[in-house]
Amino acid sequence: MTRKTATSPRPLQAQEHRLRRMRDTSPVGPVPSHRAGTAPHSNATVDVGWGRLIFAQTFADPAAIVDAMREETPDRRDIAFYVRDPHVLLSKAPQELFLDPSHAYRLDLATWRPVAPRPRGFFIRRLCSLADAEAVNAIYAARGMVPVQPDFFWSRRDSRTITVFVAEDEASGEIVGAVTGIDHARAFEDPEKGASLWCLAVHPQATRPRVGELLVRRLANHFKARGAAFLDLSVMHDNESAIGLYEKLGFRRLPAFAVKCKNRINERLFTGPETDDGLNPYAGIIVDEARRRGIHVEVTDAEGGFFALSYGGRKVRCREALSEFTSGVAVSICDDKAVTRRIVGAAGVRVPEQIAADDGADLAAFLHRHGKVVVKPARGEQGRGISVGLEDADEVSLAIEAARGVCDRVLVEEWVSGQDLRLIVIDYKVVAAAVRRPARIIGDGQSTARALIAAQSRRRSAATGGESAIPLDAETERTLRAAGFGLDDVLPEGVETAVRRTANLHTGGTIHDVTGETHPALIDAAIAAARAIEIPVTGIDLMVRSPREPDYAFIEANERPGLANHEPQPTAERFLDFLFPLSRPAAIAPAPAASAHDKQDA
């Protein structure tokens, strides 16, 4: 047997031909490959509001793509997509560009079957008003995506190149999701008749299932009807839930690459992971804003949310929004709900009547006088051990025992009906206000309450980085029972019911910004409570009939409020203004007046 000898290297032209054949026979079809000049439009770009899509396959050479990327405007994220030779492109501007850590996917519309399950509790339609555009932008803000000026969408509402579909909740009329599609044939007369999907976003507090899936299906059906050959998208490599959805719908990996500019928005994508990956969202939002301002960050205990900030010779230690500027006395007052109530009440703030659970004979009279009561541990946080709206003496007794599992001292309080309003006070100014709503489920006529709670809990956990989940405990069962259901009952389609009485985020509650509509009397009450405690950064909880009305009752004060729950209000920015006034982007300007009120890809 003779040994084969190594042959001379294949000629460069033959190697290129072989690589081209490999690309063009990929399972999902060829990557767009036409050269500039073969299509009617070369150097094609499309402005999509948050930045520009730069279709790299229409550019004659990498230098031209670099020139286009250098035209990126501040606070925008341009994306060069379908980059065939990213290593060559990056070599032209290694200090300015980076290879995006995303995967490309394609749906073959020739084999796509335009069948979709009927939406339950919502419907999908085109964006058709300025209010729609503002709602989409609010979803982008809640998802940490690059914002778009609402009039951008509105001015392009009749565009044949850009199509925006929104999902509208049938009951509330709120926009709960959106997706954007680009018609390549309309954009640059693409001879391959492609289309692409961008900015699939579902509000993190949406309660309806399958919103994202049905938005994708609607967009695919839309482009198939237009005669498009395929629908492409780019998704971050670690976005497992989105990748799972796309693969379920029939999208397949595509050998295409995206390149982005090294800018502030993309920083985490090209600088590598930080050493503080364990920080929760409440600490992370402050640390991220500090780094943007050039404030030095030292994470001392990521799991506990502890870090130190240094700027201009000052060093401040923090645990989330609790800093050295909050005294130990103020923390002690907030920690004991009975003490908080007495001090705040003495300052003229309206507080509900309250007694200790150990008061024996007085307890029955208290329940009789108020009809409904709240049982809460004297010390505790995140809604643990709190039972709301109790009417029966036996229920009160059971709730007291449960609360003692959190704290030996238990309080029984007058129940005040209404909405739970959280106001963030920083430096004795209200910077955000939000209504907190208890966790709810919506029946589909097929699933048990237990299954619906589990599904909603998974959605809330995914939307909050694991911070929010609905516990399956006695309080959940009691709340369901009051609505006439058990955990194993099937809820009729469209029936909506609360599964918790308290609105805490950690027990599955949702939070809705009302900063711009909060009544001045409520603003004044929150500031008065903060001044009485002498706490410069706090979350004040009021029970209100409506945030637009002056009636309220003080519930409690939180010495470590979650600033990450109040998008789009700039809570982290105001917190750092308080700690380091000279770190403001415009240090000579006064702080903003008190108000009365990595995911841009699919």
Image (cartoon, rainbow, N blue to C red):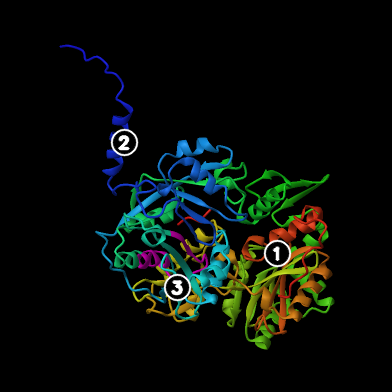
- Residue beneath disc 3: 158
The residue range painted magenta reads 198-219
Q: Which quadrant would the N terminus be assigned to in this image?
A: top left
Q: CA distance from mark 2 to mark 3?
A: 41 Å
Q: Nearer the viewer, mark 2 or mark 3?
A: 3
Find residue 19 and name its label.
Answer: 2
Above or below, 292 against 556 in this view is above
Q: Are marks 2 and 3 in contact (CB under 8 Å)?
A: no
Give the quarter of the figure containing the C terminus: bottom left
Name the kind of residue labelled 1 in the image: Arg
Q: Position of residue 6 (x, y in %)?
A: 27, 16
Q: Nearer the viewer, mark 3 or mark 1?
A: 3
Q: Residue at x 37, y 73 (%)?
A: 119
Kind of element beneath mark 2: helix
Looking at the image, residue 329 sits to the left or right of residue 159; the answer is right
The residue depicted at 38 percent of the width and 58 percent of the height is 184
Q: Is residue 447 left or right of residue 80?
A: left
- The amino acid type, in three-letter code, at marker 2 is Leu
Q: Which residue is mark 1?
A: 379
Q: Tell me what residue is drawn at x 71 percent, y 47 percent.
A: 307
Left or right position of 396 against 471: right
Mark 3, residues whose alpha carbon is within 10 Å: few (<14), some, or many (≥20)?
few
For the residues labelled 3 and 1, the Cα–Cα distance comes to 57 Å
Between 397 and 168, the one lying in front of the other is 168
Image coordinates of residue 350 in percent, x first then y, are: 77, 80
**In the rendering, at what x and y percent does residue 86 appear?**
45, 40
Residue type, numbered disc 3: Asp
- Give yes or no for residue 406 being in the magenta stretch: no
- Residue 157 or residue 564, whichever sits in front: 157
